[in-house]
Image: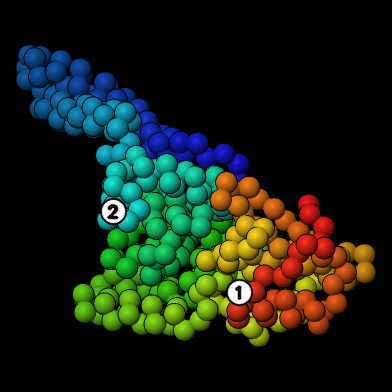
Amino acid sequence: MGKATNLCYKRSRNHYIGWALGSYFIGSACLPSGIVMLTAKPFLLGGIILTAIGSVGLAFFIRNLLLIFSPANGKLGKSVRPYMDGSIRTDVKSIFALIDEDIAQNGKKFGYVRVGKQWILGGEAMLIERIRGIFCVKVYRAKRREYAIILVDDRQNVQTTNLTREKHLDELNYYLTHLFPYAATGNFNDYLAFIGKKDAEMEAFNKEFLRRSAAVNSEYVLTEADDIPTSLVTIEKLRRAINSLQPGQRILLSACNPPETEWGRCTGISCHCFVEDGRYALAAYFETDEGEQQCFVQRFIPLAQLYAVWKAFFEKAEVPDVDTWDEI
């Protein structure tokens, strides 16, 4: 994804610019007229109503104006405060920078929503590893349709983001439910039931979620040809993914804790299927302490050897010897 410089600040400011303009027009239209009617003879009761509406509009304008210049105190800034536990960052500005970097490097776009490796950003932000509930809302009215994604974290904090297209909602829901197969899912009624859980019920759900998630090898993330990542990785799943590759497709196995090698940290390996003859190529990716990226490729690798390399990397974190491979 492209640059996401100051995306959090821009998104927060743009939200309040719209509200500021609306409240300004309401206040500027109602307040002067109300004052005139209050001072007119005979006294007009409508002047009280217009003055009250204008005063509220003016108050909202001042509030939104302050939030434009102080995004950390706005809706988006407040949404990241539950994650300011000292283990990530200790202030909103630092977390905004962290989200911007994650979205810029790893972000996927689903309409208004951006999903990185650590954060999901809509009108608010949520730490992805904390997600426990994923709910789709589709409201069909006579003249319009409304779509929204509702996310709930392990502390029952809620993020609701409206989307303009049903396609974006379906794609986002598909992506997140594959990323978190043990999260609670459903429609708005299911959301109400989930958010209504008592503390003891929610604690039990979190324990079960973590237990089931830990039952699979979470040290690796597999991205199959459909570009959907999953942490539910088994050796049989890897074999099926390789066997199902079509010409021109690729699968990637990323290491959450990259093993150290003489070429740097091995962040993952991938398998490519050639368009021309359906034969395979194996690639290994490395990152040095200085942040330099390297990629080595072994072309036309036999399928049996390919299986062996993937199995060794997955089960024993053994990295293939890339000295004779081509660097690209």
Residue 195 visible in the current orientation: yes
Q: Is residue 186 left or right of residue 86?
A: right
Q: Which of the two residues, 215 or 168, is positioned nearer the viewer here?
A: 215
Residue placed most toward the observer, 167 or 143 = 167
Q: Nearer the viewer, mark 2 or mark 1?
A: 1
- How far across and how far down the image is residue 91, in percent? 29, 44
Q: Label 1 neighbourhood size at 10 Å, few (<14), some (14-19), many (20+)?
A: some
Q: Is residue 223 visible?
A: no
Circle 1: element type: loop
Cα distance between the residues tagged 2 and 1: 31 Å
Front-most of 223 and 164? Answer: 223
Residue that sits furthest to the front in the current view: 262
Residue 126 placement: quadrant: bottom left
Task: Say which residue label 1 marks.
Answer: 317
Say above or below: 241 vs 265.
below
Mark number, residue 197: none
